[in-house]
Image (spheres, grey):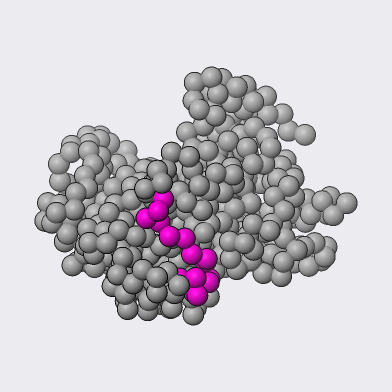
Amino acid sequence: MKNYTQSIAAFQEAQKHIPGGVNSPVRSFKSVGCDPLFIASAKGAKVFDIDGHEYIDYVGSWGPMILGHAHPDVVMAIQKTAAKGTSFGAPTLLETEMALQIKKMVPSVESIRMVNSGTEATMSALRLARGFTGRELVIKFEGCYHGHNDSFLIKAGSGALTLGTPDSPGVTSGTAKDTLTAGYNDLDSVKEMFVKYPEQIAALILEPVTGNMGVVIPDPEFIQGIRELCTQYGTVLIFDEVMTGFRLSKGGAQQILGITPDLSCFGKIIGGGLPVGAYGGKREIMDKLAPKGPVYQAGTLSGNPLAMSAGLTTLKILDETDGFYDMLEEKSARLGDGIKKCLADLNFPGVVNRVGSMFTLFFTEEAKVNSYPDACRSNTATYAKFFKMSLESGIYLAPSQFEAGFMSAAHTTKKIDRTIEATYDALTILKG
Ligand code: HOZ
């Protein structure tokens, strides 16, 4: 058994000063029933805790670290930029360069606004959709998480689901009544809402491949169907690509699904590990934003030079490295197939959902996990045990059944094979 003395003491101290000891709830490890690790540093595919243990990392800061931690080019870009000043609250050339780079990689983006987090991106995109359409209602999907805006903390995934607060107190009934929730991969539930409110739905937002109830893949007819419904009813289709953007392909989930949203929200990878978000899409919608149009949205640190340089360096590597996404797919398939084989060899009930470098192992008796109710039938107690055993073996997974794992370019075949061996050993013990 590893000795976690330093992390335990650090958590006790943090709890005296920070609510729950953490600055974001899922970090608390509450749903897996142990104290969180305090991280000292990270490099490549590894994180190191303050007790001196090292782990192969599949959290990747919840998605941004697609190149691995502390990539030398990203670190150098941040250092060089920092030396010239860290924030001006005025336009910089880097912001236009970033906009051009995003537009090049995601052709549906004709115009883009940088913000400071994924939450800010989805919140602002919704306001813009409402301002553009003059309508108030929004459709979201059960189990999808779009950050912690009031409008989206309704039947939400990620930490809200894990910690048992998918409908958060503090969200007013007035706000909640403007959010309609439909079933992921349940097109009929979406149609019903359009029939009921044909001229009132401003926006429909979804994770085009989910990560926040674990990885769930959209059926082609579902995703095509919602595109058609949005077009038919004049509703703004918003893809929340905070996790999937620049991860599933250069052009994100929309590229691999072949569906063009009206607006897209980004975060995580576009900041290269610094706090950033962005939303963009059709010019006629984006032009409604102030100062060009009447919809207000602003930010002192929006387009911050450090975040722009880290993000831009990351995006350029993704864009300019031949075969980058094929390489990532190969690594991810090796891990995904390896875990599937462990389940099959041991006759252990479970489902591995994977798209590119995002994956989830659901501990379930179901044959597939295709929806929020399917995901909710997973055995979270088994996940908690598996999580702790993995930590003991030096594998750092998301501390929740309802999250995605992320592969990076820095994960070597050796590390992946070690992960598969550790998974086999843990499942063998769990099998009893
Ligand atoms: N958006 C991240 C993945 N669900 C979670 C980050 C957090 O809530 O701390």
Which residue corresponds to the image point at 29% horizontal and 41% vertical from the top-left?
306
Q: Of all residues shown, which one is farthest toward the left?
A: 292
Q: How many marks overall?
A: 0
Residue 429 image point, x, y percent: 84, 50
Query: Which quadrant of the view contains residue 83?
Result: top left
Q: Which residues are magenta?
A: 176-190
Residue 367: where, in percent of width, then height?
A: 71, 70
23 relative to 269, above or below: above
Q: Quick one: 172 or 415, which is closer to the camera?
A: 172
Res 411 visible: no
Up-down: is 24 above or below 288? above
Q: Residue 415 at x, y = what percent? A: 64, 53
Left or right: 248 as drawn, with respect to 73: right
Q: Which residue lies most toward the right here?
A: 432
User: Residue at the spot x=55%, y=23% of the render?
Assistant: 15
Q: Is residue 425 left or right of residue 113?
A: right
**Magenta segment includes 153:** no
